[in-house]
Image: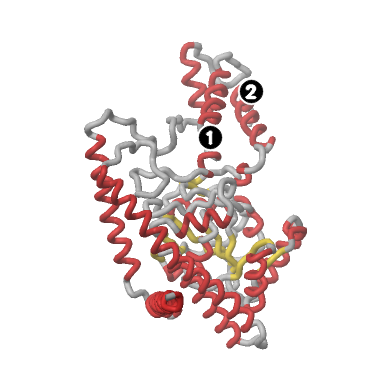
């Protein structure tokens, strides 16, 4: 009886592995899609539309719930400091110049301070993006409270599909993809440097990322592929998740830049650098800007090396906005290839809140979501203009990415996620008010 059970388990495992290899891995290796993901996503769209209609129909029978404001939980004035203080001074008309001061001016700063306490522009960028309707996952929008019996049954069926069918399949694919990367790049690293070695290395990297994309049920649409980053350049993109690398490298190889880690990540990094000139730094080197800039300049000077992939924000943002780009990658004289990435939150929350979830928990959330659906836009290459410094160049690239991806363009530093506001920001507001009162620029 025991032998029969083991035989049955072995048969099930062989069938499972054959299906995974034959229908998913092999097509992924050759960049071929059999259309299963497209059919799956279309079925998801129909199911979610039905669930939304059922919830909305039930809500009509209940008290109306205030709609969620598109820009947050409070409405803010978009006027300048001068305009808003002018509104406050209507009861005591005075010129804003010539040394005049009115006590009611303090109300402007009190109002701005309270708005920032309730909902500032930075903190809300590090929480999951709210949805217009429930997507039958655990996370939901506070505006939707009505749940019918039918919707509950569909939700339970979805839990079974995501955890009992999709999760084992996705874990299997992820293990196969990472194993292929480590073993393949290690073996390729033994070959002498040549065009053949480079070609094999690129093939192994792309194959691995395609398998990993299948592990996330990723449906990716690439736009304007004629602007794909070229060798010897720097590709910069907005940053939402660690899987941004998988999304972009699924369409071509890049040289990665980052800090050397230990554990499993360290094993992967060491194997990758044997076959491809990735730029890994020790922790002590990351603090030396000159050493980092020199390594990057040396890389882009060699036009045979892959374009460097950099996320200038330096941290993950929740895919609603783009925050300040660090200037380091914009002042080394290389051609910049901007890329905009926009995820569809309807199928899963791609944002990694590193303060709330560790990497394992985050990957588990990704592999138990419905799918990863996103759009990638390759923007025309950009270069430093005459008389333009690195800061203005970085802001120009950031604005282009924000416009294309439909994201909010913010000037705030993403580092405020873990640090206090710099004194220079406070001084800037003080100088602005002082120039209004004293009448100086």
| Residue occupied by mark 2 | 438
Task: Describe the element under mark 1 as helix, strand or loop.
Answer: loop
Q: Could you classify mark 1 by the number of other residues whose Cα lies within 10 Å: few (under 14), some (14-19), or many (20 or more)?
A: some
Q: Quadrant of the C terminus?
A: top right
Q: Quick check: 410 above or below 305?
A: above
Name the residue rendered at 61%, 43% in the picture. 417
Q: Is residue 27 visible?
A: no
**Res. 371 image quadrant:** bottom left
Q: Position of residue 434 (x, y in %)?
A: 64, 25
Task: Describe the element under mark 2 as helix, strand or loop.
Answer: helix
Name the residue rendered at 46%, 62% in the picture. 379
Q: Position of residue 87 (x, y in %)?
A: 47, 20
**Res. 134 image quadrant:** top left
Q: Quick check: 434 above or below 43?
A: above
Q: Nearer the viewer, residue 145 or 107?
A: 145
Name the residue rendered at 24%, 44% in the picture. 54
| Residue occupied by mark 1 | 120
Q: What is the CA distance from the residue labelled 2 to the residue labelled 1?
A: 29 Å
Horizontal relation, residue 247 to residue 38: left or right: right
Q: Could you classify mark 2 by the number of other residues whose Cα lies within 10 Å: few (under 14), some (14-19), or many (20 or more)?
A: some
Q: Quick check: 376 above or below 253?
A: above
Q: Position of residue 239 (x, y in %)?
A: 53, 55
Q: Nearer the viewer, residue 33 or 21?
A: 21
Q: Nearer the viewer, mark 2 or mark 1?
A: 1
Question: Residue 264, labelled with which disc?
Answer: none
């Amino acid at each position: 009886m025991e032998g029969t059970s083991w035989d049955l388990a072995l048969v099930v495992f062989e069938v499972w592995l054959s299906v995974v290899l034959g229908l998913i891995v092999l097509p992924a290796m050759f960049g071929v899609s059999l259309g299963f993901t497209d059919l799956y996503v279309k079925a998801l769209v129909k199911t979610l539309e039905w669930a939304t209609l059922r919830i909305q129909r039930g809500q009509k029978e209940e008290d109306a719930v205030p709609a969620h404001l598109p820009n947050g939980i409070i409405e803010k004035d978009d006027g300048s400091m001068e305009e808003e203080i002018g509104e406050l001074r209507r009861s005591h008309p005075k010129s804003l110049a010539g040394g005049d001061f009115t006590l009611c001016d303090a109300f402007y700063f009190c109002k701005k301070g309270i708005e920032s306490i309730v909902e500032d522009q930075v903190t809300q960028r590090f929480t999951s993006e709210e949805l217009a309707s429930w997507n039958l996952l655990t996370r939901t929008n506070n505006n939707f409270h009505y749940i019918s019996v039918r919707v509950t049954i569909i939700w339970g069926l979805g839990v079974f599909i995501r955890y009992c069918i999709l999760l084992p399949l996705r874990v299997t694919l992820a293990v196969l993809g990472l194993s292929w990367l480590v073993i393949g790049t290690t073996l390729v690293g033994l070959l002498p440097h040549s065009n053949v070695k480079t070609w094999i290395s690129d093939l192994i990297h792309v194959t691995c990322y395609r398998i990993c994309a299948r592990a996330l049920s990723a449906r990716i649409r690439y736009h304007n592929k004629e602007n794909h980053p070229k060798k010897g350049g720097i590709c910069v993109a907005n940053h939402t998740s660690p899987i941004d690398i998988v999304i972009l490298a699924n369409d071509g190889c890049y040289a990665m830049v980052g800090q050397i880690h230990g554990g499993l990540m360290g094993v992967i990094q060491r194997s990758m650098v044997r076959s491809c000139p990735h730029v890994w730094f020790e922790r002590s080197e990351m603090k030396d800007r000159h050493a980092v800039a020199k390594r990057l300049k040396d890389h882009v000077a060699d036009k045979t090396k892959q374009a460097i992939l950099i996320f200038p924000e330096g941290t993950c943002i929740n895919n609603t906005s783009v925050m300040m780009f660090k200037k380091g990658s914009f002042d080394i004289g290389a051609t910049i290839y901007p890329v905009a990435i926009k995820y569809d939150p309807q199928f899963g929350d791609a944002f990694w809140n590193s303060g709330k979830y560790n990497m394992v928990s985050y990957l588990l959330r990704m592999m138990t979501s419905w799918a990863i659906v996103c759009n990638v836009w390759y923007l025309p290459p950009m270069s430093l203009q005459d008389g333009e410094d690195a800061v203005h160049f970085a802001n120009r690239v950031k604005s282009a990415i924000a416009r294309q991806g439909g994201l909010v363009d913010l000037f705030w530093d993403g580092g405020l996620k873990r640090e206090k506001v710099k004194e220079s920001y406070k001084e800037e507001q003080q100088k602005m008010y002082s120039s209004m009162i004293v009448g100086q620029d």
